[in-house]
Amino acid sequence: MARVAIMTGFAPTLPLFRAPLIGMLRAQGHEVVVAAPAIEPWVRERMQDAGAEVVELHYARRSMNPLAERGVRREFDRFMRDVRPTHVLAGTIKAVCHGMPAAAAAGVEARVAMITGVGSVFVRSGLRWWIARQAASALYRRALAQATHIVFHNPDDRDDFAAWGLLAPGVPVTVTAGSGVDLTHHGAQPPNPDGGILFASRFMTDKGFDEFLQAAEFVHRNDPAIPIRIAGFGDGNEGAAFEQRVADGARRGVWESVGRRHDIRPDLAWCRVFVLPSWREGTPHSVLEAMAAARAVITNDVPGCRQCVEDGRTGLLVDRGDVAALARAMQSLVQDHSRTDAMGRAARARAEQHFDARVVAQQTLATMGLG
């Protein structure tokens, strides 16, 4: 029997993305410990119901203070001593960059680094981000050399990490279809003739949220009858400003704001078109959920997103930052019911063929030697 630690920097991903994997591990008789900072009660409850032990880590997931990183490493060392896992799966930058060396130092036999996306540090521009990128690259280079396996969520990230010199020779690499999507939990929904446009994600610059708000304003001016719904919450330094813009638009009747959702299925059943104009992703789970619900998707032609959507068949791809093109795509698609219905059916079929979470979970187990 293995004792598997699953570590992440963002606790909600545990029940939302890792449930099929945890279920398979428990069905095989393995112990599972999940660990993350700032674990909310609903996350803790769902993980305990799934049979996992829950450990809260104490570090700031968004801090870029180099001095604070020493404390983060000590936190992962403490976790390894207390939990004593035999296998470790780490996703998100700090869990990978500090969790891999800590696991290696503790003698953990299977150390899998999951690159769930390159993150803001490799996407944004400016001197501050350039400096952070150099530090992150050094951390990744050291950490990934101590992994026994590396999992990427799209081939572009794998190729870029190789080009940036972050991969160590001899460490095996696997590319999965993101985390996949639970096709039973997220069943196909019948078309809703009264539905509209849905954005459901964290309010972040990297998620293309500014572009979405601008495009939504444009769509509303052109046709105020088109319903637009926003689900999510502000994250990062810009989060409060984005939440204020959302509240202002809701007061003006531009869109409906429904706040943060722990279960997005009712909103997916409501919408006709799902929109995520992200700058870059690993594999956007929200897009996979929309596809599983048989909804047409509009997203950007960027790494991670382009792997999900077959342009013109399951949705539309637009260029990053092109607000006018995004607005045109949103308005034209939501008004063409026969097209969105056909795209939704094709999206569900694509999710079933390429993004089944059970298949991804089996691949992940194999990287840990548990398949």
Image (tube, rainbow, N blue to C red):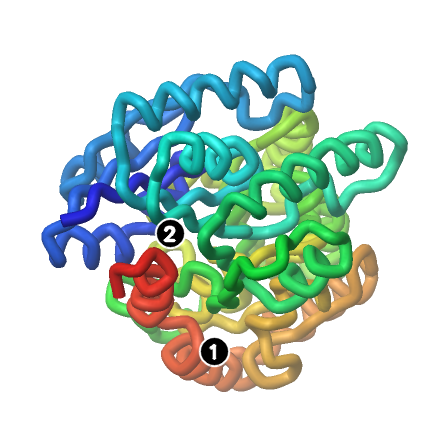
Question: Residue at point 65% right, 39% down?
Answer: 204
Distance between the alpha carbons at the discs numbered 2 and 1:
19 Å
Occupied quadrant, residue 142: top right
Marks 2,1: beta carbons within 8 A? no
Look at mark 2 in the image and give the residue it sits on: 17
Residue 328 at x, y percent in the picture: 75, 68
Residue 332 falls left or right of residue 192:
right
* Residue 36, above or below 310: above
Question: Residue at point 68% right, 23% down?
Answer: 64
Residue 128 at x, y percent in the picture: 83, 28
* Residue 78, above or below 94: above
Kind of residue sitting beneath label 1: Ala
- Whether residue 48 is visible to the viewer of this picture, yes or no, is yes
Residue 237 at x, y percent in the picture: 68, 25
Quadrant in which the C terminus appears:
bottom left
Residue 347's label in the rendered image is: 1
Kind of residue sitting beneath label 2: Phe
Residue 207 falls left or right of residue 259:
right
Residue 153 at x, y percent in the picture: 53, 61
Find numbered disc 2 in the image and state the secondary structure of the residue it sits on.
helix
Lower sequence index among marks 2 and 1: 2
Q: Badge 2, how many Cα within 10 Å: few under 14, some, many 20+?
A: some
- Whether residue 256 is visible to the viewer of this picture, yes or no, is no
